[in-house]
Amino acid sequence: MTRASGIRVVAIADADSFVKWAASLLGSVPGLRPHLLLVRTPLTASIEQQRTALAGTALRSEEVTRIGFPEAAGWLAGQRPDVVLLAGRGPFVRLMGRVIDSLEHRPVTVSGLPGMAVPAQRGALDYRRHTDLLVVHSHREVRAFEELGRRIGVQTPVALATLPFARRRQRMLSPERARVDAVVGGRGGVAVAERPAPTAPVRPAATDIVFAAQALVPVAREERAEIAAMLVRAAEAEPGRRVVVKLRSRPGESETHLEREPYAGLLPSRLPKNLVFSYDSMATVLERAAGLVTVSSTAAIEATAVGVPVIALDSFGVSKSLLNTVFVGSGLLGGRSEVVAGRFRHPHPDWLRDNYFHPEAESTWWERVEQLVALRRSGALPARRVPAARGGSLHEAWHRASVLGAEDRTVQGSLALAVGSPATRALAALRRRREPSDGGTWSDAATDFTLEPNPFHDSIRR
């Protein structure tokens, strides 16, 4: 990775997961001093979520600016960045793309997704088609998005980065000698780390079972209730260990995706004393983790990076709609009884290189950015502009108001929502009726991309 001398970078984000991803991704570039611009939407991270998202990154609170959407164009014009990283859900990226189109000094635009992105979804690529570069995090994702682009006629360049949360880090050692799961010199020995210096902080023993909750999967209330019951059984099976439910948002806060059935409402009112909730950063929670369980959260990759064994739940099947087909062949798939018994596991080595643990030298996204900056400065990089909305200014107003929610105070936005919301519901219902009866590409286990709309009904309007 080369140093980023003389290149000014701004990340524009709103939701907490994109704040974490943008800060971590840009923090991986030596010599780069980026700035984070948080634009107010219904999804924008709270101050507490921002603090958690930035924990462990190089970005400081004074390098974060919070503004409303109407001020974004003027702020960017004054800063004149060379690169803008658009970090948000697809409609947010498209809206901010229109702001970029209005600037006299046009930056290189980069977009990406804040975690695992298998399957590659049509909407994810289509909303980002106007950016100069799409960043993904595994060789498998590169192939999936390039094939998806060929299928739908989108030619957005794709570049490989190391998932910021997949950089291998040494586990914090206990005060006693710590056994390290590594073979020394191929002779079958076990590496032993000696007692840390007396000044080292004493860390609690790593005994927790951590559950990385997700808003989208599983969808059904009964399946989420089964997970809640599993967590209670795991806590009761071994009272000496904690079962930690890792959540992204406190009551009253928003997050990237809408959670319709929160686990707090599915767990009994009287919990085992060792079943607790945590809003800390995932890195902090993993310091005490003996195992992590999830359906398909990127936390599984973060845990693998620090040597924490994982179970990716397959109790409800393995399918694209559960976002867990990425774990096929990993050795991580397991059921609820295995979680209760604490039978966590590490991934198969053959799975790692194609799935988020490629050598750092293969992550060339920043070199691609530098090349694009050089082309833009020389006038040789054409602008990839957001296409005009097919419904004209009213359609654009509807899109803006949909993203900004109450932050959009324009009369045109209110009118567009009043007219457009019933129309979009009718169109969505029509599309669902036209979807293939066999599920189409969402049911095709032989591919890593989908062509139909996703099944989550996860509106950005809250």
Image (cartoon, helix red, strand yellow):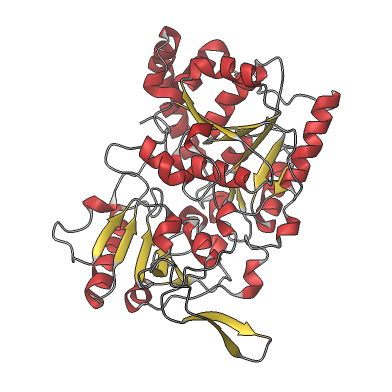
* Residue 127, image quadrant: top right
412 left or right of 168?
left
Residue 84 vertical position relative to residue 269 in the rendered view, above or below: above
Seen at 67% across and 26% down, the residue is 81
Q: Nearer the viewer, residue 13 or 320?
A: 13
Q: Is residue 432 left or right of residue 25?
A: left
Q: Position of residue 69 (x, y in %)?
A: 49, 19
251 shown above or below 361: above
In-front residue for pair 358/122? 358
Nearest to the observer: residue 152 or residue 438? 152
Q: Residue at x 54, y 19 (%)?
A: 72
Percent position (x, y) of residue 178?
47, 80
Q: Quarter-wise, where is residue 391 in the image?
A: top right
Tell which residue pokes out farthest to the front in this image. 198
Which residue reaches farthest left?
Answer: 270
> Which of the two residues, 200 or 224, is positioned nearer the viewer here?
200
Name the spot of residue 363 as percent of width and height, x first.
72, 53
Give the quadrant of the C terminus: top left
Q: Is residue 422 visible?
A: no
Q: Which residue is located at x 47 percent, y 39 percent?
A: 432
Res. 185 visible in picture: yes
Q: Quadrant of residue 372?
A: top right
Q: Is residue 229 left or right of residue 312?
A: left
Q: Is residue 133 left or right of residue 377?
A: left
Vertical placement of 201 versus 251: above or below? below
Q: Position of residue 362 (x, y in %)?
A: 75, 57
